[in-house]
Each structure stands twice: as C-alpha cells, then as structure tokens.
Image (tube, rainbow, N blue to C red):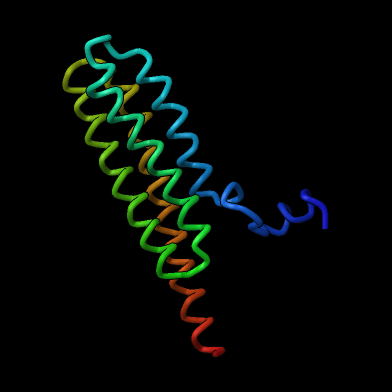
Amino acid sequence: MGAEAAKSKNVVRSFHDLDAWKACRTVRQAIFALAQRLPKEERYRLADQMIRASRSAAANLAEGYGRYHYLETIQFCRQTRGSLYELLDHLTTALECRYMSDKMFREQEQQVLDAIRLVNGFVRYLHTRRKGASATS
C-alpha cells in the first residue's frame, strides 16, 4: 500500500502521522519564531523556557509512540500536556511583559489549546484501544 493510500485511510505508520504530534510541531515552529523576536536579555530566560517546553511537547509524543505500550504512551501524553500548559504560562508572561500583542497571544494560545485538545483525544483513543485489547485477550 502506497503512502497516499495509507494516509487516505488514516493509517498511522509513525508518530509523524499523529494529528496531535502535527499540532505540537506547528506550536514548536511558531514558538521558535516568537522567541527570536524577544528582547536579547530574554534569550536565556523566557525564550529558552518557551523553546524547551514546545520541543518537549512534540518529543514526548514521539517517545511515547515508540514505547508500544498503552499505559506508557498515555504517560508520555500526560507529559506532553504538561509541557503545553507550561508553555501557556510562558506565553502569559510574554504578554504581561508586553513582548507580544493581545492578538498574537490569542493566536498562540489557540494553537496550544488546539494541540491540547488533540492530545486529549489521542489519550481517549488509547484508553479505548486498551480496553478493546484486554477484552479480546
């Protein structure tokens, strides 16, 4: 089966295919661009924390996907969710310090909330799959 056929049937062959990971990747890219615009004195403070939290979110999903065990994958999703909430706090700090406009904050916040929603959906899916797997055993 070709890659296009796999995508059309929503077959997940890698963490790259997960909608939650794609959303975290989009967040990571947006945060990197935002961090580049922060004042120089924030380079190793707020900018670094924002970049680390955004990278952690996507990386934890990838690592959890590689565990091949429902409960471990779910635990890594929880870590992803924690990193995304941490990032929301950093964005709030950037807004309070006037490093970003209200409009930019709302856009970034919405991207992060969308990623959280997709991570939560992936966790629900994993719980359902786990229950189905244990019922057939």
Give the farthest residue toward the top.
Answer: 40
Q: Is residue 2 above or below residue 54?
A: below
Give the farthest residue toward the right.
Answer: 1
Q: Residue at x 39, y 44 (%)?
A: 57
Give the farthest residue toward the left.
Answer: 96
Q: Residue at x 29, y 36 (%)?
A: 87
- Depth check, front residue: 14 or 44: 44
The x, y position of residue 24, in whole percent, is: 45, 41
Q: Residue at x 41, y 65 (%)?
A: 72
The x, y position of residue 108, in whole percent, is: 36, 30
Q: Residue at x 25, y 15 (%)?
A: 99
Q: Quick one: quadrant of the N terminus?
A: bottom right
Q: Is residue 38 above or below residue 123?
A: above
Horizontal arrangement in the rendering, residue 67 relative to residue 81 (left or right): right
Q: Image quarter for residue 73?
A: bottom left
Q: Quick one: quadrant of the C terminus?
A: bottom right
The x, y position of residue 123, in whole percent, is: 42, 63
- Depth check, front residue: 8 or 68: 68
What is the count of numbered marks?
0
The x, y position of residue 51, in whole percent, is: 35, 29
Q: Image quarter for residue 103?
A: top left
Horizontal arrangement in the rendering, residue 10 relative to residue 49 (left or right): right
